[in-house]
Image (cartoon, rainbow, N blue to C red):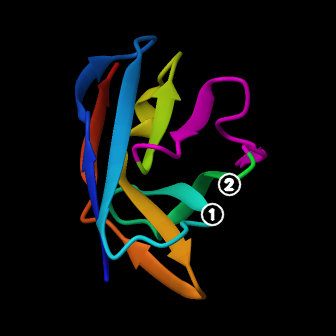
Amino acid sequence: QVQLVESGGGLVQAGGSLRLSCAASGSIISLNHMSWYRQAPGKQREFVAIINQSGATNYADSVKGRFTISRDNARNTVYLQMNSLKPEDTAVYYCAASQLGMNYWGKGTLVTISS
């Protein structure tokens, strides 16, 4: 089993920045993709960003140019740098990781952007 713990959420004014972290622990052999999703109140969970072992990334159109995903393979940690935040970025942000065909999720961290 792999456990994922997110941190770094909070309340920020529009235009501000936050950096989320997600640390993986447990039975780690080789984490493949690591990603971020988010779920706003009353909405479905949506994809935000993904990074593979080699560092290749992909982003949702809504966050391109504002968010940056990165990972530290030695620390089994993935980050999400969020800049130019907007009220519509308000959501619970979840970390996800895949390993040997299994997908794991964290419990989420709340990000609130005030206008």
Residue 114 as seen in the image, left or right of residue 61: left
Mark 1 nearby-residue class (10 Å; few <14, some 14–19, many ≥20)? some
Which residue is found at the position 47% from the left and 22% from the top? 85
**Quick check: 66 left or right of 113?**
right
Q: Is residue 70 magenta?
A: yes
Instruction: Give the residue pinned by disc 1.
Output: 33
Residue 87 vertical placement versus 92 (above, below): above
Q: CA distance from mark 1 to mark 2?
A: 6 Å
Mark 2 lies on residue: 53
**How far across and down, in percent of the image, does residue 101 sit?**
60, 88
- Amino acid type shown at disc 1: His
Query: Which callout, 1 or 2, points at the residue further toward the start of the chain?
Result: 1
Q: Give the image quarter of residue 71.
A: top right
User: Disc 2 residue type?
Assistant: Gln
For mark 1, give the secondary structure: loop
For the residue labelled by badge 2, is the local secondary structure a helix, a strand or a loop? loop
**Where 105 falls versus 49 (above or below)?**
below
Residue 76 x %, y %: 43, 51
* Quarter placement of the N terminus: bottom left
